[in-house]
Each structure stands twice: as structure tokens, then as C-alpha cells.
């Protein structure tokens, strides 16, 4: 790490010891960062590494707990996005803030601080978009534009304010490769004018291709400050995912020959502009196996969960097979009847209805699979509240769910306790297959280990378990084999003991070298993909 | 400066229960102010508006006649609203129920049988449900906003009724009045206690619909499905419930009850088709549904209160010499205060003073 005097003159933006604490969590812990003029600077890190927190502090939407920001050598406080723009910092967000019913020029006019006529703005925007190779029709309605074009509006909007530093948050996550190429040309043009870019990404290949310098974060701490071109993808990945050696806890359950859940050549188109298309996914899980699916958020995890659970159907019934039955056209209730259980990522409003009691949430997931027990009155389907209550008390006891009052609303439970209930609700049925998305997201350590243990126990009892998680520690702790999802593609699952953090990091960064050992991957990485 | 509604962290259970009563109180206060402004003694005016109609047996019968359609429609709407489907077109479904139910007594008036009435009622429900199916279909197929489509269909229904009564269904012995043939006795909904007043079976239908809907919402899986999908479509999908099927269920259910209300009104009170058969029951029922907190039992009570405003409006014409539009004013005030009270239970109002630069910054 280079040591400069604070406020070194050739730095456009300099950050010293920036810290942000949310309650117990140190989202940013003494971060140092230096961005020079005419530099494309990468901010690399996994989800939850603290990239967004850092950027929000730089753009004035979060106040640092401690630390100092220098702008052109002078200590400054950035109190609001308006102030950040005043200094000359512009930001292009990952999710756009555009009014679909308005035209491009009108949208741009809305973000301008001064009153400028629409004609004037269209003219300026047209000039800028020509100059920077961002073709854009100022009179087009946003609703008719593609995601790439919408991003151009945001970039042009930012450029119109003539910033010296432009922050781009995961700009290529929504772009096609061709659109991304065009974006890179624009960025190089911006750099050639003496402006700087802070480029947030987790894609190693892109960072190596266009960035002059990279700052790497992990768990809120600075883990690297380097020239990405001088590094290998593997060494960058190591900084990103950490290099501590994890002991793999293979629990010695017997893997049976029976395939309990299988996806064959499963593809699904993206449903919204921000969704990810699933491409040709193959997944086979036998009884006793726990497959961990690693990956950075937004690479198709929730889409994969939705098609496996049956919340979204696929066209071809044979693409998904559960317990020997083709299930691609079966809904979630029918898949539950085949013996599958599901735990989605979002607790509130997906796995549970917040304003309903725990026993009502019991009915939510099990009204069909436990119809014989829970319902009476034949076609009237009267809910037997007493039986449901007993079942939910059984789960509360089994999973050690802590709560106040009898049968409280789901919203009154802490995240960890609600998650224990939600996982327990499925485990109580002794499912042959369980698919869990982010089993311990935002859950305290005690609850997390309780949940992980329960999943391991279920596999040892002969069930097939699919764990989708961004937490690599978790994956190494529970999984018997590991696959990585990236941009809607799933790598082939490999036994956990053969997987290294380095290799996972490479796969997460979009470097596909399925059959090449790590050493070769290093050599090929620059050309791969 | 701007005004912001900020969500309260928790809301008071006490105020949730008493809010309809606070709204009622505020409505009466606002009414007193209005009467004073019109140079009427507010006490006398409120007395003749709200109390007098309750002092005579025959006017209690009238109350039941007005309350029955309101309750029937509002109970149906409560299911619709709870499932997060916004059927604003009950007025149209009411009218279509009246028209379709009248096919038998008008076009097949020679048919004398005890079956006439049950057939009329069933056809009335079918007519209302079929008309409600249109916005449901548009919503599920084309993602159309059901508030707009159901509301616009009200005007279609009103004009259709107007046309059919003046045109093909005009009474051939009716001296060219825009009215249909008068119904035969088999086609008329029997009165409950003919000795003391006009109230007919419609209020019994309202009681039955209230109890059955209450049972469904409280004890049956179907009611649970309505609540789940209304609160979180995503959780509903996780439970294996179909949001599209729920749109149809909610619209058909509320449409059928509105249709039943329509044919009951035509068959029981009017006894023929006229160019206008509803004093806005379908819209007033929306107020009833919310005043009753979307709970069928609460709706029954709220239906009686709103029915009173109709009677009060009539009384206001006779005893205090004000137009019956005053009933509309009271209904509007009541809805306004109910919604305002509910909003203030969940949100607090905050005035924000911010500089121009900050506003621009937050807008990014």
C-alpha cells in the first residue's frame, strides 16, 4: 500500500480511515482510497463487502462515523448528494431513477438544479451523446428504450453536470456484452479528458481490461490496493474472497444412488429488465448430498430458486425432475406433494406474511401437503386452528425459536428466529428434497449454526439439499459439493474438498475454466470468456 | 416546505377499533357546521336527519330496504378489497344484475310458477358476476387497471339500462312511459311483515351473505388465501395460490352479490325496470365496506348507518327544506373522515423545511 501524506496534491479524491458503523456491524472499517486525475479506479468486492456503503459516503447520502475525505487535497464534508455534485462528483446508479412516461430530455431536465429550457437541454444532450459515442434520441420516451439506452441517459445526465469524478455502480450488470464494450469506449473517452471514474464491480475481467487501479474490500475492510493489470485473476479473486484456509466439515453422511432433484439443460428468459436469464443449467443432487451454489448476488440465484420451487414454471416438463417425476410444469404445491420443501431468500412477504401469526404462516406453506391434518369440512376446507397451532408449537420447540407471547405475528420476531421457524416449517415435514436460498442471510451466529446443523442432519438422513448462498464460509461449512452461478450459468458441481476459494473466486468473477486446473487458469485468464 | 406522511413504527390497537366512531363523530360535527352555515338550527337538523327516521316502525322498514343492497354489495366488495382487487364498478354490476334478472318476468311473463323468483335471483347473480368478469379478464390478460375499467363499465351499464327500458323492453301498455312491464306477483320478492311495512326478503339475504362471508374469511382456507394474496402476492405464490384465479374469484364473488342486490331491489322495491334503479348504492357500498373495516359483521352495522343517510336526506327535504343532495354530502364527509382517521393511525404528518439544494439532491 502506497503511503502518501494526507491531501497529496495529485489525488483528486483521497479517503483516510473512513469508517461507518451500523449498530454492531462495521460496514466500513478504516478504508483508505486514492483516486488520481485521469484514472479509472476499480472498487472490487463481494456483496456485503462494503462497496455501497463507501460509495454512499462519497456521494453524501451516508454520513461517515469517522475518517476524513479530501477533495483535491482539501478536507471536506459531503453532506448531501447536492453538495457532492457541487464538488464535481457525479453518480450513475445501478437501478435507474427515470420516469418512463417522460422523454429523455424531460428526464434530464428534472435532474438539473437550474431552470434550463427543454430545447436547450435536448441540444446539449444531443451534442454530448454524439461526443461520447452514446447514441440517444432526446425526444424518445423512456418507456420505449432498452436498459442500455436508459443507462446512457443516466450517464449523459451525469456528464451534463460536468463532473470531475464519475461513480458507476455495477454498470455492466444490466448490459449485453456489446453494450458493455460501447460503455468501455465511453469511459476511456472520459478518462482522456482528465476526468476520473470510480468503477464498482465484481467482474475481474472487466476490471483488468479497463481499470488503472483497484481497491479491494472484503467484510468492510481494505484487502487490496493494486494495479489490476499487474495481478492475475486468481490473485484478485483471493483478495476479494479472502485466503484463509477453511476446514471442510464433511459430515460423513452416505450419498445414495437415487437422484432426488435434477435440472437438465434448464433455461429461462429474464422476466424483467433487471432479472437474469438462466442459461442451460445442469444440476443433479442425490440423497445425502448438499450442493452449495455460490455466486455474487444478482447472478440468477433467485431466478434459479423460482424455477426449482415452481413459483415460475418452465416450458418443458422434463427440464426439472423431482423424486423421479418430471416437474417442470408443476406448481409449488404439487412439488411439495412430491416431497420437496423450499425456503426462499426473503423472509418478509415471501416466506412469511409479516402481519400474520406464526400458525397462520404455518398454513401458508403447508396447507396442501398437510391438508389431511390441517383442514376439515371437505370441500369447505375449514382450517383446524388448534391442530395448526400444535404443529407450529412443535417447530418452535424443535428449532428453539425465541419469541414473546403465544403465537405472535411474524413481524415481531427477530430475523434469526423467524428464519429458524421458516426452515423448521419445511424440515418438520421431513422433505426428500429441500432448496434453500440464502439460509442465514442477516441471521445471528447462533441461529445460523442451528440452521446449518439442521440442513446437515437432513442430508445425513438421506435427503437431497440445495443451498444457494453468497456466504462462502457457509458453503464450505455445509456443502458436500459446490457449484458457482454467474450470469445465469451454473458451473459443474465439484466435490467440496477439491474446491478452493481461489477457484470459486475465479468462477464468481466470470472466468470460466471448468476443466482447467488453477495454474493453467492463471495463464489463460486474460483470454478466457 | 413540504408535507410528508411518515409511517409510524407501530399503530395503536385502541385507535384502530374506535376510528370508525371518531369518523362518525367528526362527520356529525362537520354536518352541524354545515347546517349552521345554511342558517338552520344544527340540533334540529341533525335530529331530523339522523334520529327521526328511527322513531317509526314503517321507517325502520324503509331503513331495511335501503340497508339490504348496501350490505350485500359491501360484503362482496370487502372480499374484493381484502384481496387487493379494487372493484369500483359494483354500481354497474348491480344494474346488470337487475337487468339480467328481469329477463324472465319481462320476456317470459306468461310463465307462472313458483320457480320464477329463484330463477330470477340466480340470473341476477349470474348477470352481476358476468359483468364483473370483464374487468377481471382485462386485468389478468392485459394488466389493465381494474379501478378504471370497472368504473367506466358503470356508465356503460347505466346507458344500457336506459336504452333497454326506453326501447325493446318498454311496457306495451305503459302509455309510452320509459318503464318496463310491471312484474307479476310470482316475480315479486315477498315482504317480510306486510302488516307493518314494506321490508322484503332482501334484508334476509343480506344477513345470510354477511354470516357466510364472515365464516369464509375467518375459518376457511379460501378466506386465508384472500388475505395472503391481498397482503403479499409473492407470499401467495409461495403458498401455491394463484393471483389470477383470485382476481376472478374476487370479482365474480362481489359481482354476484351486487347482482343479487340489483335483482332484489328491482323485484322487491321497484317491481319493474325503470331508467334508473339505484340511487348510487354501488358507490355508497364502498364507504360501507371501509366504515365496516372490511369485516362482514362491521359492514352490517355500517350498512345500517349509511342507509340512514338516505332516509335522512329524504327527511331533510320534507322537514328542513334542504335538497336531498345533502345525503351525498354526508356520505362524502363520512368516507373522507374514515380514510383520514385510518391514515393517521398508520402515519404521522410531518412538515419538512428543506433548502433547494437538498431537495434537488434527494431527487437524484
Image (tube, helix red, strand yellow):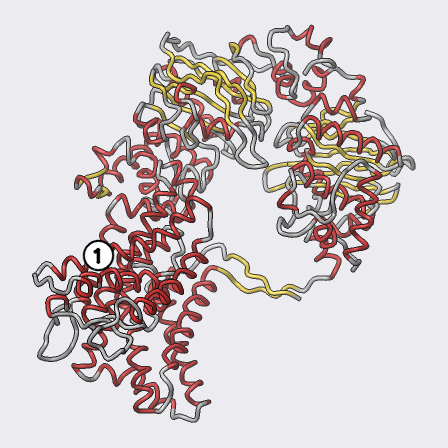
Residue in view at x 26 percent, y 58 percent: B257
- Depth check, front residue: A505 or B171: B171
Is A470 located above or below residue A353 in the figure? above
Q: Is residue A309 left or right of residue A443?
A: left
Residue A316, how many percent across, how many down?
Answer: 42, 22
Residue A121, how many percent across, how many down?
Answer: 79, 52
Q: Quadrant of the N terminus of chain B?
A: bottom right
Quarter of image, res A473: top right
Residue A249, how many percent across, how many down?
Answer: 49, 14
Badge 1 marks a residue whose secondary structure is helix
Quarter of image, res B131: bottom left
Q: Is residue A261 left or right of residue A159?
A: left
Asked if residue A412 can be seen in this view, the reply is: no
Residue in view at x 59 percent, y 36 percent: A274
Residue in view at x 58 percent, y 24 percent: A295
What chain is tagged by disc 1?
B
Is B32 located above or below residue A451 in the figure? below
Residue in view at x 18 percent, y 73 percent: B182
Residue A7, how many percent across, how many down?
Answer: 88, 38
- Depth check, front residue: B315 or A212: B315
Q: Is residue B171 left or right of residue A304?
A: left
- Depth check, front residue: A283 or B284: B284
Quarter of image, res A115: bottom right
Is B313 located above or below residue B79 in the figure? below
Residue linked to disc 1: B123
Amino acid at each position: 500500500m502506497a503511503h502518501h501524506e494526507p491531501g497529496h496534491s495529485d489525488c483528486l479524491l483521497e479517503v483516510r480511515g473512513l469508517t461507518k458503523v451500523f449498530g454492531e456491524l462495521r460496514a466500513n472499517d478504516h478504508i483508505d482510497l486514492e483516486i488520481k486525475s485521469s484514472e479509472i479506479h476499480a472498487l472490487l468486492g463481494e456483496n456485503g463487502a462494503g462497496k455501497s456503503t463507501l460509495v454512499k459516503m462519497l456521494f453524501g447520502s451516508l454520513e461517515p462515523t469517522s475518517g476524513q475525505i479530501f477533495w483535491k487535497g482539501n478536507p471536506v464534508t459531503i453532506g448531501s448528494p447536492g453538495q457532492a455534485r457541487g464538488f464535481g462528483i457525479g453518480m450513475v446508479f445501478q437501478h435507474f431513477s427515470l420516469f418512463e412516461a417522460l422523454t429523455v430530455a424531460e428526464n434530464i431536465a428534472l435532474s438539473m438544479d437550474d431552470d434550463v429550457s427543454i430545447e436547450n437541454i435536448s441540444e446539449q444532450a444531443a451534442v454530448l451523446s454524439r461526443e461520447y459515442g452514446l447514441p440517444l434520441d432526446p425526444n424518445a420516451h423512456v418507456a420505449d428504450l432498452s436498459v442500455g439506452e436508459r443507462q446512457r441517459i443516466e450517464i449523459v445526465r451525469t456528464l451534463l453536470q460536468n463532473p470531475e469524478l464519475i461513480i458507476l455502480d455495477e454498470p455492466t450488470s444490466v448490459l449485453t456484452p456489446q453494450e458493455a464494450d460501447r460503455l468501455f469506449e465511453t469511459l476511456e473517452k472520459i478518462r482522456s479528458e482528465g476526468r476520473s471514474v470510480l468503477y464498482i464491480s465484481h467482474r475481474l475481467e472487466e476490471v483488468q481490461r479497463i481499470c488503472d487501479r483497484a481497491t479491494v474490500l472484503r467484510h468492510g475492510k481494505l484487502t487490496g490496493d493494486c494495479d489490476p493489470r499487474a495481478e492475475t485473476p486468481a490473485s484478485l479473486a483471493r483478495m476479494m474472497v479472502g485466503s484463509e484456509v477453511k476446514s471442510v466439515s464433511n459430515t460423513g453422511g452416505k450419498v445414495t444412488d437415487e437422484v432426488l432433484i435434477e435440472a437438465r439443460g434448464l433455461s429461462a428468459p429474464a422476466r424483467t429488465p433487471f432479472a437474469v436469464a438462466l442459461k442451460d443449467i445442469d444440476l443433479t443432487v442425490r440423497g445425502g448430498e448438499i450442493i452449495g451454489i455460490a455466486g455474487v448476488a444478482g447472478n440468477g440465484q433467485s431466478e434459479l430458486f423460482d424455477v426449482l420451487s415452481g413459483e415460475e414454471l418452465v416450458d418443458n416438463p422434463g427440464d426439472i425432475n423431482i423424486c423421479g417425476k418430471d416437474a417442470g410444469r408443476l406448481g409449488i404445491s404439487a412439488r411439495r406433494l412430491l416431497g420437496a420443501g423450499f425456503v426462499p431468500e426473503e423472509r418478509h412477504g415471501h416466506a412469511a406474511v409479516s402481519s400474520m401469526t406464526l400458525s397462520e404462516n404455518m398454513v401458508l406453506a403447508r396447507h396442501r401437503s398437510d391438508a389431511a391434518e390441517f383442514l376439515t369440512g371437505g370441500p369447505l376446507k375449514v382450517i383446524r386452528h388448534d391442530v395448526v397451532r400444535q404443529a407450529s408449537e412443535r417447530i418452535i420447540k424443535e428449532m428453539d425459536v425465541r419469541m414473546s407471547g403465544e403465537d405472535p405475528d411474524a413481524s415481531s420476531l427477530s430475523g434469526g428466529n423467524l428464519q429458524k421457524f421458516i426452515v423448521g416449517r419445511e424440515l418438520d415435514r421431513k422433505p426428500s428434497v429441500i432448496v434453500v436460498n440464502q439460509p442465514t442471510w442477516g441471521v445471528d451466529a447462533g441461529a445460523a449454526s442451528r440452521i446449518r446443523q439442521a440442513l446437515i442432519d437432513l442430508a445425513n438422513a438421506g435427503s437431497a439439499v440445495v443451498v444457494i448462498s453468497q456466504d462462502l464460509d457457509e458453503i464450505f461449512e455445509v456443502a458436500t459439493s459446490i457449484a458457482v452461478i454467474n450470469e445465469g450459468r451454473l458451473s459443474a458441481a465439484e466435490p467440496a474438498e477439491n474446491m478452493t476459494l481461489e477457484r470459486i473466486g475465479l468462477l464468481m468473477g466470470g472466468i470460466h475454466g471448468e476443466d482447467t486446473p488453477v495454474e493453467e487458469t492463471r495463464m489463460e485468464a486474460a483470454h478466457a470468456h | 416546505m413540504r408535507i410528508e406522511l411518515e409511517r409510524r413504527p407501530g399503530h395503536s390497537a385502541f385507535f384502530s377499533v374506535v376510528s370508525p366512531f371518531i369518523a362518525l363523530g367528526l362527520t356529525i360535527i362537520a354536518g352541524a357546521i354545515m347546517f349552521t352555515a345554511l342558517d338552520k338550527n344544527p340540533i334540529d337538523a341533525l335530529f331530523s336527519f339522523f334520529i327521526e327516521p328511527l322513531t317509526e316502525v314503517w321507517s325502520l322498514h324503509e331503513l331495511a330496504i335501503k340497508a339490504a343492497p348496501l350490505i350485500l354489495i359491501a360484503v362482496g366488495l370487502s372480499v374484493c378489497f381484502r384481496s387487493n382487487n379494487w372493484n369500483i364498478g359494483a354500481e354497474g354490476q348491480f344494474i346488470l344484475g337487475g337487468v339480467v334478472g328481469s329477463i324472465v318476468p319481462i320476456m317470459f311473463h306468461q310463465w307462472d310458477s313458483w320457480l320464477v323468483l329463484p330463477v330470477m335471483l340466480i340470473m341476477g347473480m349470474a348477470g352481476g358476476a358476468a359483468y364483473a368478469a370483464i374487468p377481471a379478464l382485462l386485468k389478468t390478460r392485459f394488466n389493465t387497471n381494474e379501478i378504471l375499467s370497472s368504473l367506466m363499465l358503470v356508465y356503460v351499464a347505466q346507458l344500457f339500462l336506459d336504452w333497454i327500458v326506453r326501447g325493446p323492453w318498454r311496457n306495451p301498455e305503459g302509455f309510452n312511459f320509459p318503464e318496463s312491464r310491471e312484474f307479476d306477483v310470482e316475480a315479486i320478492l315477498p315482504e317480510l311483515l306486510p302488516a307493518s311495512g314494506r321490508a322484503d326478503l332482501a334484508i334476509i339475504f343480506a344477513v345470510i351473505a354477511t354470516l357466510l362471508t364472515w365464516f369464509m374469511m375467518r375459518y376457511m382456507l379460501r378466506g386465508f388465501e384472500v388475505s395472503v394474496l391481498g397482503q403479499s402476492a409473492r407470499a401467495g405464490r409461495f403458498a401455491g395460490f394463484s393471483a389470477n384465479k383470485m382476481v376472478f374469484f374476487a370479482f365474480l364473488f362481489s359481482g354476484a352479490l351486487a347482482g343479487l342486490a340489483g335483482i332484489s331491489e328491482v323485484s322487491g322495491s321497484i317491481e319493474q325496470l325503470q331508467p334508473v334503479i339505484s340511487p348510487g348504492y354501488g358507490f355508497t357500498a364502498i364507504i360501507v365496506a371501509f366504515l365496516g373495516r372490511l369485516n362482514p359483521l362491521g359492514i352490517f352495522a355500517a350498512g345500517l348507518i349509511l342507509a340512514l343517510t338516505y332516509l335522512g336526506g329524504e327527511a331533510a327535504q320534507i322537514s328542513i327544506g334542504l335538497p336531498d343532495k345533502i345525503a351525498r354530502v354526508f356520505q362524502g364527509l363520512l368516507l373522507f373522515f374514515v380514510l383520514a382517521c385510518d391514515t393517521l393511525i398508520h402515519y404521522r404528518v410531518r412538515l419538512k423545511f428543506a433548502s433547494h439544494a437538498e431537495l434537488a439532491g434527494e431527487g437524484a
